[in-house]
Amino acid sequence: MTSEYQMLVWSVILGLVQLVIAVVAAIKVRGLAWAFSPRDKVMPPLEGMAGRIDRAFSNFLETFPLFAALVLTAGALGVHGPMTQWGTMLYFWARVVYVPIYVLGLPVVRTGVWTVSAVGMVMLVLALL
């Protein structure tokens, strides 16, 4: 397995961990009755730490499909080298760091870390061009 695919797998694991953390935080605020309900009633957005956890996960969901498509395309085309390796590592490690920074409420640092993950994806695009 290439290092790019390894970073893809680790990114999936990161997404699963974020999912569990977000669900636990939401249940803590909204209760088990909400968790087991059909969720027909619109709930107000989560606030505080639970809201930041939820938004961090939503942000992951916005970027991950693009990252996965780039990694899978690079693999299918046999594009593998320093640019794809660094790109996948930048994306993954920036996403790891993004979670606690977002949860702690550090907006300027958060944007910088998000930018690093975006640079990782741009590196993958450049390697594919």
Image (tube, rainbow, N blue to C red):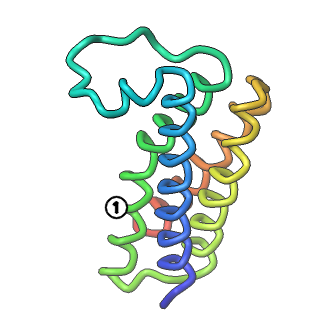
- Which residue, given by chain and number where applicable, does mark 1 sit on? 69
Q: Residues within 10 Å of mark 1 (few under 14, many from 20)?
A: few
Q: Nearer the viewer, residue 44 or 83?
A: 44
Q: Residue 81, located in which quarter of the rendered image?
A: bottom right
Name the residue: 61% across, 49% down: 117
> Which of the image's four quarters has the C terminus?
bottom left
**Above-or-below relation of 84 to 22:** below
Q: Secondary structure at mark 1?
A: helix
Q: Position of residue 65 (x, y in %)?
A: 36, 52
**Residue sitting farthest toward the front:** 33
Q: Position of residue 87 (x, y in %)?
A: 59, 64
Name the residue: 76% across, 36% down: 101
Q: Residue 43, located in which quarter of the rendered image?
A: top left
Q: Nearer the viewer, residue 23 or 101?
A: 23
Give the mark count: 1
Name the residue: 74% across, 41% down: 100
**Above-or-below relation of 111 to 100:** above
Left or right, residue 125 beside residue 87 = left
Q: Position of residue 104 (x, y in %)?
A: 78, 30
Name the residue: 66% across, 17% down: 48
Residue type, numbered disc 1: Ala
Q: Residue 36, located in which quarter of the rendered image?
A: top left
Q: Nearer the viewer, residue 46 or 92?
A: 46
**Above-or-below relation of 3 to 86:** below
Q: Nearer the viewer, residue 113 or 126?
A: 113
